[in-house]
Image (cartoon, rainbow, N blue to C red):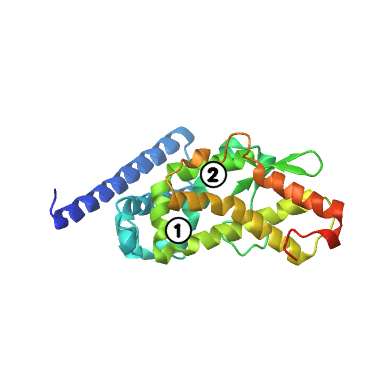
Amino acid sequence: MFPKRASLFFSRKCLETIFLLHYYCFDIGFAMQREETGKDCTMNEQQGNTKAIIVDVFKGLVAQGQHKKISVQNIAELSGVSRKTFYYHFADKARLIQWVYRFELAGLLEANCATEDLVSLPPGSRLNYPELPFYARTPVGIRSLDGSQFFGILGEYLQKNREYYRRVITDRPFSNFIRYVISLYQQAIISDIRFILGGRQLPQECLSQLAMYFTNAAITHYFDALLYSNRDLRGLLPEGFLNINHENMSAAIESYFSQGANKFSFLGR
């Protein structure tokens, strides 16, 4: 066993090594691009590399159990950047956590889903990172959707990063991450409901309540399992039932219109 001070020193040296490896890898990458194309990396590429270093340092600190005392100064120092550079990329640590989720999940969605099935935030959204897809669903027929591929990808991603999200979500300063995720997907589910409606109308209050219900049924289910059980998130829903959320959504809406608004009791009215 290392003495506590030696252990902290060792952890810091590990993170410094991570930074140096990133620095030299990116430096070699820049040199190779200059040699192959005769061009320097663009400012956007350099900024992306800086973001990647900050993210890896932050996730390294979380993995070592130091998330409860992480400061922007710690992250900046171990990333080899100034506090000003950190704040250029992220308004605060909460934005950094949001970026990790959005960026990593977007990469998986773009690699595995058809471009036309990807969902990003609508123009004018007050949530962050509108350029990154965070959801996917496939139209099936006129008024049906299949979201099974998305939930399969989400389960894989959360399972792989389970310990990171457990530590981040249970730490009070970062607890607003779940509220952010719920707000994010509520917008997507509202869009899904409108697609299933196919031009039919529901009162706005009804639309919002349905969106909240189905967002909690789908998304909160994964994060509750992540936090409070040891179930494999890749098999959270049985095979053949990955699209249960959209199937229930369609069934509830069709029931509403087949029975008539006065007979519909789904919302407990």
- Which quarter of the picture shows residue 175? bottom left
Quadrant for the C terminus in the image:
bottom right
For the residue pair 252 and 136, the one nearer the viewer reads as 252
Drawn side of residue 123 relative to residue 73, left or right? right
Helix, strand or loop at mark 2: helix
For the residue pair 69 and 218, the one nearer the viewer reads as 218
Whether residue 13 can be seen here: yes
Provide residue 85's location: percent of width, then percent of height: 40, 61
Image: 265 above or below 36: below
Whole-angstrom CA distance, mark 1 to mark 2, is 19 Å
- N-term-proximal mark, 1 vs 2: 1
The three-letter code of the residue at mark 1 reads Leu
User: Which residue is rendered at x = 43% and y = 63% of the image?
Assistant: 174
The three-letter code of the residue at mark 2 reads Leu
- Which quarter of the picture shows residue 154? top right
Do callouts 1 and 2 mark residues in contact (Cβ within 8 Å)?
no
Q: Residues within 10 Å of mark 1 (few under 14, many from 20)?
A: some
Q: Using the image, tell me which numbered label, if any, was put on residue 29.
A: none
Q: Residues within 10 Å of mark 2 (few under 14, many from 20)?
A: many
- Identify the residue under disc 2: 154
Helix, strand or loop at mark 1: helix
Image: 12 above or below 33: below
- Identify the residue under disc 1: 96
Mark 1 vs mark 2: give the one in front. Answer: 2
Provide residue 86's location: percent of width, then percent of height: 40, 61
User: Which residue is rendered at x = 58% and y = 43% of the image?
Assistant: 151
User: Which residue is rendered at x = 33% and y = 62% of the image?
Assistant: 68
Provide residue 45's location: percent of width, then percent of height: 48, 47
Provide residue 108's location: percent of width, then percent of height: 54, 40
Drawn side of residue 35 relative to residue 203, left or right? left
Whether residue 43 can be seen here: no
Drawn side of residue 254 relative to residue 42, left or right? right
